[in-house]
Image (tube, rainbow, N blue to C red):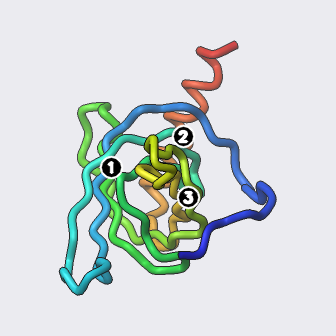
Amino acid sequence: MEYWEGKNRRQSLRVKYPCLVVIYDQEAEGGKGKQSILTHTDNIGVGGVCISLKTSLKRFVVVDVELDLLDLEEHIHCKGKVMWVSPREKDTQGQVVSFDVGIEFVDIKEENSCRLKRVIQRLEENDK
């Protein structure tokens, strides 16, 4: 399994925002076919999202992403590319039991990008 060990190369600000995310992995491991994974964000930005998962995803695979910003508006649907995977937690035997996964948005509508930007700016202002 290949993990990300590079530097932070984010091009946009990320904020802690626990919105709901559903990842639809077309290339699920073990030949399961399409797999839906419900999780929360660790942080989010206009360019992508960091999520925590109990299973790993392959780097550079394109996934379908559904974001619920919990703002009473429609969910955001877009494509995303898995850019990095990093072990987060290990059990008592040293086996990895959860992963941080960085996903870059690659196919997000301009209106949704603007909506994300508004949410992020509001959170940043409230954090000051």
Q: Residue at x 43, y 50 (%)?
A: 98
In whole angstroms, how far apart are the C-alphas of marks 1 and 3? 13 Å
- Residue 88 located left or right of residue 77: right
Residue type for callout 3: Gly
The residue where tag 2 is placed is 43
Place of residue 111 in the rendered image (x, y in percent of width and height, measured from the top left):
44, 55
Judging depth in this view, the residue of 101 and 49 nearest the camera is 101
Q: In the rendered view, tell whether residue 75 sits above or below residue 70.
A: below
* CA neighbours of label 1 inside 10 A, class few (<14), some (14 to 19), many (20+): many
Residue type for callout 1: Val
- Secondary structure under badge 1? strand
Place of residue 97 in the rendered image (x, y in percent of width and height, measured from the top left):
41, 50
Q: Residue at x 33, y 70 (%)?
A: 64
* CA neighbours of label 2 inside 10 A, class few (<14), some (14 to 19), many (20+): some
Comes first in the chain, label 2 or label 3? 2
Residue type for callout 2: Asn
Snapshot quadrant of residue 79: bottom left
Residue at the limit of the structure toward the bottom, as seen here: 31
- Residue 15 located left or right of residue 25: right
The residue where tag 1 is placed is 21
Place of residue 127 in the rendered image (x, y in percent of width and height, measured from the top left):
63, 16
Mark 2 touching mark 3, by CB under 8 A? no
Comes first in the chain, label 2 or label 1? 1
The numbered disc on residue 52 is none
Q: Residue at x 60, y 34 (%)?
A: 15
The residue where tag 3 is placed is 102
Judging depth in this view, the residue of 47 and 117 nearest the camera is 47
Place of residue 87 in the rendered image (x, y in percent of width and height, measured from the top left):
55, 54
- Secondary structure under badge 2? strand
